[in-house]
Amino acid sequence: MHPNIENKVAVVTGGSRGIGFRIAEALLEQGSSVVICSREEAGLRQALDLLQETAGPRAEAMVADVRDYQQVEKLMARAEERFGGMDILVNNAGIGLFRPIEQLTPEEWDEVIGTNLTGVFYCSRAAVGRMKRRGGGYIFNIGSLAGKNPFAGGIAYNASKFGLNGMSEAMMLDLRYENIRVSQIMPGSVETSFGRSSSKGPRSSSASWRIAAEDVAQVVLDLLRSDPRTMLSRVEMRPSKPPRK
Ligand SMILES: NC(=O)c1ccc[n+]([C@@H]2O[C@H](COP(=O)([O-])OP(=O)(O)OC[C@H]3O[C@@H](n4cnc5c(N)ncnc54)[C@H](OP(=O)(O)O)[C@@H]3O)[C@@H](O)[C@H]2O)c1
């Protein structure tokens, strides 16, 4: 247990599976209270049941779409009402639609940018005042190496994650004197159901060369434990041994 984590209140967006679920699980194991959100109720319920098995009432969930500011406001208000404040925000919810420019529809473009970029702005904006009332906080933005390495078919996803780099650092500069730290975590390929049509459930994983979702969660814990006098603004994560090209 660590004082920067134990008894703190966290919101993890996209916490029903994959990286977000593992981050929520890790924060709960270290004594935080955590509210997770996602759009789909059944998956969220399943994730909450698993989290409550060990964390009990310190785990909470609410259906919320990060593309909708009113829903985001309600999510942050729920965390504050339920647990008495808000200290940690993990902007993790994200989608990937990978198509060449002529095949990507304007609606799909809006979906990716609305989730991966505007959603981060909405959640952070709704969280900052609440963190200030607590005397500080920590915002994590789950970016991607796709935020520095463009690839064919990545027009919307690359744009969202490149944009997130700029947003994260600007936010960090806005908030540094408010005792609110902002870190951007940029993983390479992580073993989740991301970008695939079906999900195998919150704890799905398999033996793989990819980064494990638990390893991203470990970085969140490591950054939270780090001394606030130093800002670790960006962490790049890569699989050690991806298949040789
Ligand atoms: N997996 C990778 O290789 C990888 C690599 C680098 C970075 N990342 C980033 O890591 C983050 C998590 O990815 P993941 O691999 O864990 O994906 P995932 O397994 O597909 O999980 C995504 C989560 O986000 C939720 N979500 C999606 N759209 C949402 C919205 N509009 N509002 C609220 N929740 C929403 C999903 O639930 P619902 O569908 O029910 O809403 C789900 O809980 C993303 O930002 C992704 O870009 C992933």
Image (cartoon, rainbow, N blue to C red):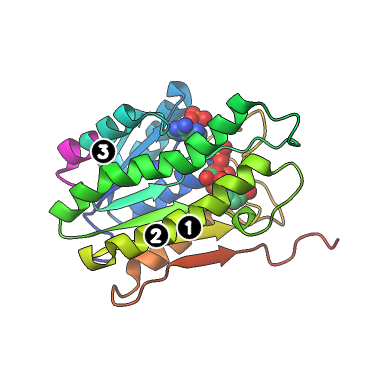
In the image, is the residue at mark 1 within 8 Å of ligand 1 by its beta carbon?
A: no
Quarter placement of the C terminus: bottom right
Q: Is residue 242 left or right of residue 135?
A: right
Per the model, the C-alpha gap separating discs 2 and 1 is: 6 Å
Query: Considering depth in this image, is 16 or 87 the residue closer to the camera?
Result: 87
Number of other residues with Cα within 10 Å of mark 1, as a class: few under 14, some 14 to 19, many 20 or more: few
Q: Amino acid at mark 2?
A: Ala
Answer with mark 2 or mark 3, whichever residue precedes in sequence: 3
Q: Which residue was labeled with disc 2? A: 170
Contact (CB < 8 A) between labels 2 and 1?
yes
Q: Is residue 209 left or right of residue 7?
A: right
Q: Which mark is residue 76?
A: 3
Answer with mark 1 or mark 3, whichever residue precedes in sequence: 3
Quarter placement of the N terminus: bottom left
Query: In this rendering, is residue 218 above or below 35?
Result: below
Identified at 67% across, 34% down, the residue is: 196
Q: Is residue 58 left or right of residue 224?
A: left
In the image, is the residue at mark 2 within 8 Å of ligand 1 by its beta carbon?
A: no
**What secondary structure characterizes most of the magenta part?**
helix
Kindly state the secondary structure of the residue where label 2 is placed: helix
Q: Which residues are magenta?
A: 78-86
Q: Which residue was labeled with disc 1? A: 166
Identified at 33% across, 47% down, the residue is: 124
Contact (CB < 8 A) between labels 1 and 3?
no
Residue 132 lies within the magenta run? no
Q: Position of residue 165 (x, y in %)?
A: 50, 57
Per the model, the C-alpha gap separating discs 1 and 3 is: 24 Å
Number of other residues with Cα within 10 Å of mark 3, as a class: few under 14, some 14 to 19, many 20 or more: many
Kindly state the secondary structure of the residue where label 1 is placed: helix
Kindly state the secondary structure of the residue where label 3 is placed: helix
